[in-house]
Image (spheres, rainbow, N blue to C red):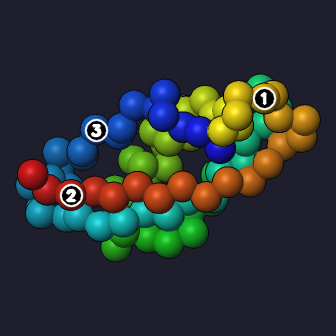
Amino acid sequence: MDSRNCAPPEYPPNAYRRGESGTVQLALLVGTDGRVVESKLQKSSGSHELDKTARKALSQCKFKTANGDALTEATWTNLTYVWTLD
């Protein structure tokens, strides 16, 4: 699954001020149209706010197969997002 067209989530200001960072692991069910049908938190970053923001933003992404072919059935894919303070 290719999600390169996906804009990264914006760092939640309150989480940034608190110095929160971490890695969120999500499972996303992608429909045949490439849109996310369902999402599940697989591993928390340790911050509810970062988890929620990543899940909401990445659920808006549109996916395609690595070779560009259309999906013939809904497919689960795993996605990891790393929140780092700059």
Decide: few, some or many residues near mark 2? Use Cα within 10 Å; few <14, some 14-19, many ≥20: few
Task: Indicate left or right for 33 with 80 as reference.
Answer: right
Res 69 label: 1
Residue type marked 2: Thr
| Sequence-first tag of 3 and 1 | 3
Please state which of the two labelled residues, at mark 3 or mark 2, is closer to the viewer. 2
Mark 2 element type: loop
**Residue 57 location, quadrant:** top left
| Sequence-first tag of 3 and 2 | 3
| Sequence-first tag of 2 and 1 | 1
Please state which of the two labelled residues, at mark 2 or mark 1, is closer to the viewer. 1
Q: What is the distance, in whole Å, between disc 2 and disc 1 at their CAs?
A: 33 Å
Q: Residue 24 at what x, y percent from top left?
A: 43, 63
Q: What is the distance, in whole Å, between disc 3 and disc 2 at their CAs?
A: 11 Å
Q: What is the distance, in whole Å, between disc 3 and disc 1 at their CAs?
A: 30 Å
**Residue 72 location, quadrant:** top right
Mark 1 element type: loop
Res 84 label: 2
Q: Nearer the viewer, residue 63 or 19?
A: 63
Residue type marked 1: Asp
Res 10 label: 3
Task: Indicate left or right for 82 with 31 as reference.
Answer: left
* Residue drawn at the location 71% of the way across and 28% of the way down: 68
Report the residue that reaches farthest toward the right.
72
Task: Indicate left or right for 28 with 86 as reference.
Answer: right
Where is the N terminus found, in terms of image quarters?
A: top right
